[in-house]
Amino acid sequence: MKDKLLKIWQLSNTKQFAGIFEEYMKELGVRKYDGRRKDNSNSYLIDAKSTGWNRVQCFYHKDSTEYGEENLLVVLRKEAGNYFIIQRKCERAFESDYSGIRHYDEELMKEILEEHGILFDRFFEAVGDKSKHQELLNKDKAKKVVKTENVSQACPVCKYPVNWKYCPNCGQRFKW
């Protein structure tokens, strides 16, 4: 999963990123944030023009419009910083920058992927990756190793002979 998120960070541009987020929000029926409206509890906001499209911040407020209470915040900066952040309610699920991955919370990232999987599938497609978020979630789950006649252990997914904690052929993790 980490390498897929790094691929989004490295290969996406900010305008494309904001367009995908906006399209996803419109499909969900979420309204754009409007300061004149009294109830903005189910709204989204994209901030990019203030930085000349160097950084795009995409906010999704589901129940509250308070700062730090967003259901999903995705930030992509390409110039003068170059970082990628995914978070929910002030808790970072993923953060990367020039030096690599700074923070990765697997539990929170799974929650976000389960709720907003379609959005991340579109991000993956935009960078040329055809794998779906559900495949990645299933691959991270440890599975029991299959006993076969010729080989003592085999991968339950691709039946490749294994003697490691993961399959060298498909990358599936195991529990013994």
Image: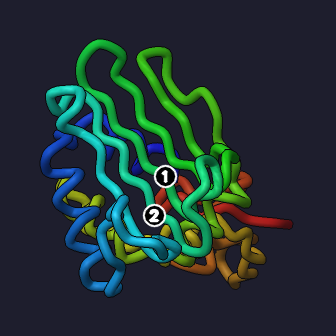
Front-most of 111 and 47?
A: 47
Work out whether 15 lies above or below 33.
Answer: above
Q: Which mark is residue 130?
A: none
Q: Which mark is residue 73?
A: 1
Q: Amino acid at mark 1?
A: Leu
Please say if the residues under marks 1 and 2 sit with CB atoms less than 8 Å apart.
Answer: yes
Q: Residue furthest right?
A: 176
Residue in view at x 57 percent, y 43 percent: 94
Residue in view at x 69 percent, y 59 percent: 108
Where does label 2 land, which residue? 60
Q: Amino acid at mark 2?
A: Tyr
Residue in view at x 46 percent, y 72 percent: 38
Q: How many marks?
A: 2
- Please indicate whether residue 4 sits to the left or right of residue 22 in the image: right
Q: Is residue 78 visible?
A: yes
Comes first in the chain, label 1 or label 2: 2
Label 2: how many residues lie within 10 Å, few (<14), some (14-19) or many (20+)?
many
Label 1: how many residues lie within 10 Å, few (<14), some (14-19) or many (20+)?
many
